[in-house]
Amino acid sequence: MYKSFIRPILFKIDPEKVHHIVVGLLKFIHRVPFGGKIFKYFFRVNNPSLERTVFGLKFQNPVGLAAGFDKNAEVYEEFSNLGFSFIEIGTVTPKGQPGNPKKRLFRLPVDKALINRMGFNNLGVDEVVKNLKKRTDFSIIIGGNIGKNTATPNEEAVNDYVMCFNKLYGYADYFVVNVSCPNISNLSKLQNKESLMEILSAITLERDKKPSRKPVLLKISPDLNFGQIDEVLEIVNQTGVDGIVATNTSISRDGLTTLASKVESLGNGGLSGMPLKNRSTEIIRYINKKTGGKLPIIAVGGIFSATDALEKINAGASLVQLYTGFIYEGPLIIKKICKGLL
C-alpha cells in the first residue's frame, strides 16, 4: 500500500514539506487515545533473539533511525513505536540555526537516493534538552549527534562540540561526533589528523570528569580512502572512542542512473541511499578486519531490506541505521528487517 499508493502521492510534494507532514502526523496520532499502543502492536517485533548489547547498551533490536530525521528530539518516542530500538537525534549545534537556503532536499527515485544540503538546521542544544526532558520510555536508546555551528570557525570548533556534549550528557545514551557532513562549509577539514585528535581528545577528557561513562562514536565519510581510514582508526584507538558510524553522505555522483544534467542542476549536497550501499559495506568490512572485530560499527547507507541489513552485519556491523530506506520503503521496513533477521 505504501509503495503503490502513499509514496506516489508524497513524492509529488516537496521532500522537506513531506518531512514536516510526517512529523506532524506522528505527533497527532500519538495524541489520540491508544494511538501509540496501536503503532506498537502493528509495527514492533519483540523477540529476545533480536536483542543486542553494544558498547554496554542493550538494544531491543539492531535497527535504528539515523541522524537527520528527528533533528530536535521531537518524535523519538513516536519513532520507537514504529519499531526502531534506537533514535539518533540531531545533528545538534550549540545555537539554533536555519541551515542552508531552500530548496535543499531532493529525491533521485531512479537511484533510490536523496541529495541534501540541509546545513545542520536545528533549534539548538537548549531546545533539544527541553524535548529530551519529556522522555517517558527509557527502553529507547537515544544517540546525540553533535556538530558545530556554521558560523563557528574550524579553529574554535572544539568548543562547540564540547558544549553540546556537556549539555546533552544527562539526556543522551551515546554520542556521535559529526565532522564528516559535506553540507557545512569546510567541516570535512575537521577530519584531518590534528583537528580530529583535538576534538575527540577534548570530548573524551570531558567524559572522564563525569560520574558515569557514556559511549562516544565517530561518524566518518564514505569518501575517505583506506589510508585516511587508517589514520582515523589510529586516533580512535588513542583517544578511547568506542565505535564508528559508517557512513555519512557522499559528495560523489559516480554510478548514478539519473541523467547527469538533472543531477548537476540540483547542485551540491550529500548523496544518500542505494548508491552508497557497496561503499558503506566495503568500509565496514575494512574497519572490522583492521580492528579484529573489536571496534563496534553502526552501519548506515543503502539499507532497504533485511538482506541489505544482513550484508552489513556479516561485514562486521553490530547495528544498522535507516534514513533514505525508510523514506523509500515506508514504515513497515523496520518490521520486515527484524523478521528477516529472525
Image: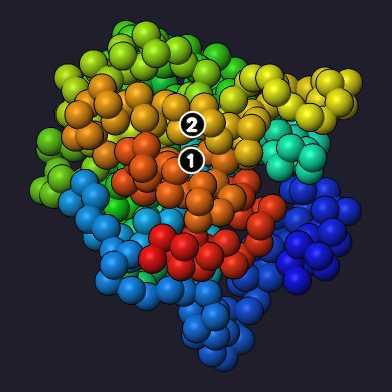
**Residue matched to label 2:** 280
Q: Residue at x 66, y 61 (%)?
A: 330
| Mark 1 element type | strand
Inspect the image, locate mark 2, and give the three-letter code of the amino acid beneath it: Ser
Q: Residue at x 86, y 61 (%)?
A: 9
Q: Are marks 2 and 1 in contact (CB under 8 Å)?
A: yes
Picture layout, residue 76 above or below residue 178: below
Q: Residue at x 39, y 13 (%)?
A: 226
Viewer-nearest residue: 20 or 311: 311
Residue 229 occupies quadrant? top left
Badge nearest the viewer, 2 or 1: 2
Residue 166 occupies quadrant? top left
Q: Residues within 10 Å of mark 2 (few under 14, many from 20)?
A: many
Residue 164 occupies quadrant? top left
Q: Position of residue 33 (x, y in %)?
A: 57, 91
N-terminal label among 2 and 1? 2
Q: Residue at x 56, y 54 (%)?
A: 305
Disc marking residue 55: none
Inspect the image, locate mark 1, and give the three-letter code of the amino acid beneath it: Val
Q: Is residue 156 visible?
A: no
Q: Is residue 154 left or right of residue 242?
A: right
**Residue matched to label 1:** 300
Indicate the quadrant containing the N terminus: top left, top right, bottom left or bottom right: bottom right
Disc 2 to disc 1, C-alpha distance: 7 Å
Q: Residues within 10 Å of mark 1 (few under 14, many from 20)?
A: many
Q: Position of residue 3 (x, y in %)?
A: 76, 62
